[in-house]
Each structure stands twice: as structure tokens, then as C-alpha cells.
């Protein structure tokens, strides 16, 4: 089995991590930071908005089980790609919609899917598309956040509904 890498940012990484952990073929999901100009940023520095980093997840997936296209379809289903630097009540450039492609094939697929989904939104797609940049894993307490903190208010009010939404629309792609 050869694993591929995908790096996506669609708001708070607690949401994206929890969602992609559900997808069959996704072997590992790690929240972290990409796209900024400071090495080894802290969560606090990123949330202050001056590092330029986005909250992202980097995932390793088996493309024989789940395609990059399906991951992108899921990505566009769980966040609003038309808002600049915002997802719901999470506001700041760290919450921007971004796809960091690892290969020319990923770039082409991302461009194609952005073009396809654009007509289903009333506003222009604001998703940033960029070649992969340095990925910095988030602090340990952010890892598996939803799994460990399901009863926490943000998890119950924001993360759980997104996980449920994806389960409804992508049931066949869910892990056992």
C-alpha cells in the first residue's frame, strides 16, 4: 500500500480532523499549521493572526480506497469556501479555506473541482490554492481533539454536527 498526502484547511482543524478521521482509506490525520512565515508556530501565535499560518490537517490516505477527488468533495461539503478568513464564528486568516497540493495531479484535480462546485454557491469561491508549504504539527492537546473532548461545548455545537453531516452524505466512504 502506497499512501498519498493531502493538506487542507477549512476553518478550525478540530472539525476537519474529526471529519476526515471518519473516511475509509484515510489512515492518519494530523492537525497543524501551514502557509505562514514563522518556523514552529505556537497555537497562540497562529490565533493572534500575525504568523500567516492556516489551521490545516495533513492526512495520509490510501488512494486505492479513497480518491483525492472524494477528499476534496468532502472538504467542500463541510465548510463554506466563499467566506474569506472565516468559518462560522471562527474569524481570522488562520481559518481560511485553503488547499495545499502536493503534486501537479492534485493541483489539476483541485482546480477542476473548484470550477465544478463554483456554480452551486451564490458567492465566488475564496479557497486559496497553493503548492504545499512547510507543515508544523499542532500541539499535542489539539491531536484527536474531538475524540477526547466530545462533551466540550465547541465539539458538541460545531464539530459533532459536521461529523453527522458527512456521515449522512458519505456513508459508503466511512470507516467501520
Image (cartoon, rainbow, N blue to C red):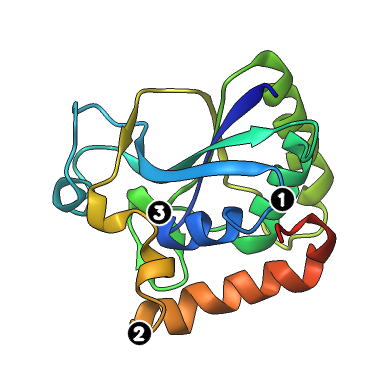
Pick the residue in front: 16 or 28. Answer: 28
Of 62 and 152, nearer the camera is 62
Is 112 rendered above or below residue 90?
A: above
Identity of the residue drawn at 43% across and 68% down: 147
The secondary element bearing badge 1 is classed as loop
N-terminal label among 3 and 1: 1
- Picture coordinates of residue 156, whole percent (x, y): 45, 83
Identify the residue shown where x is 24% and y is 50%: 140
Left or right: 81 as drawn, with respect to 57: right
Residue underneath mark 2:
153
Q: Separation of disc 2 and disc 3 at Cα? A: 19 Å
For residue 58, above or below residue 151: above
Residue 95: mark in rendering: 3
Q: Position of residue 142 (x, y in %)?
A: 30, 56
Q: Which label lies toward us, 2 or 1?
A: 1
| Residue topped by disc 1 | 24
Q: Are marks 2 and 1 in contact (CB under 8 Å)?
A: no
Q: Residues within 10 Å of mark 3 (few under 14, many from 20)?
A: many
Dot 2 crowding, Cα within 10 Å, few <14, some 14–19, many 20+:
few
Which residue is the extreme one toward the top? 104
Report which quarter residue 153 is drawn in.
bottom left
Q: Is residue 67 left or right of residue 50?
A: right
Q: Is residue 29 left or right of residue 71?
A: left
Quadrant in the rendering for residue 133: top left
CA separation in Å, label 2 and label 1: 27 Å
Query: Residue at the location (68% across, 73% down)?
Result: 165
Q: Secondary structure at mark 2?
A: helix
Q: Quadrant of residue 47?
A: bottom left
User: Quick one: label 2 or label 1, which is nearer the N terminus?
Assistant: 1
Asked whether 135 or 50 is in front, the reply is: 135
Q: Give the crowd class for mark 1: few <14, some 14-19, many >=20 residues within 10 Å.
A: some
Amino acid at each position: 500500500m502506497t499512501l498519498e498526502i493531502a493538506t487542507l484547511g477549512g476553518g478550525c482543524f478540530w472539525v476537519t480532523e474529526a471529519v476526515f478521521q471518519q473516511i475509509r482509506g484515510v489512515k492518519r490525520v494530523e492537525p497543524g499549521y501551514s502557509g505562514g512565515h514563522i518556523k514552529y508556530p505556537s497555537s497562540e501565535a497562529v490565533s493572534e493572526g500575525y504568523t500567516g499560518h492556516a489551521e490545516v490537517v495533513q492526512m495520509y490516505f490510501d488512494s486505492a480506497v479513497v480518491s483525492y477527488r472524494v477528499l476534496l468533495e468532502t472538504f467542500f461539503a463541510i465548510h463554506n469556501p466563499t467566506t474569506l478568513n472565516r468559518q462560522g464564528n471562527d474569524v481570522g486568516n488562520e481559518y481560511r479555506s485553503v488547499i495545499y497540493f502536493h503534486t501537479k495531479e492534485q493541483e489539476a484535480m483541485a482546480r477542476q473541482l473548484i470550477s465544478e462546485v463554483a456554480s452551486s454557491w451564490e458567492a465566488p469561491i475564496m479557497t486559496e490554492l497553493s503548492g504545499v508549504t512547510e507543515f508544523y504539527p499542532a500541539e499535542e492537546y489539539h491531536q484527536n481533539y474531538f475524540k477526547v473532548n466530545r462533551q466540550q461545548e465547541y465539539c458538541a455545537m460545531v464539530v459533532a454536527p459536521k461529523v453527522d453531516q458527512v456521515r449522512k452524505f458519505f456513508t459508503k466512504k466511512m470507516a467501520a
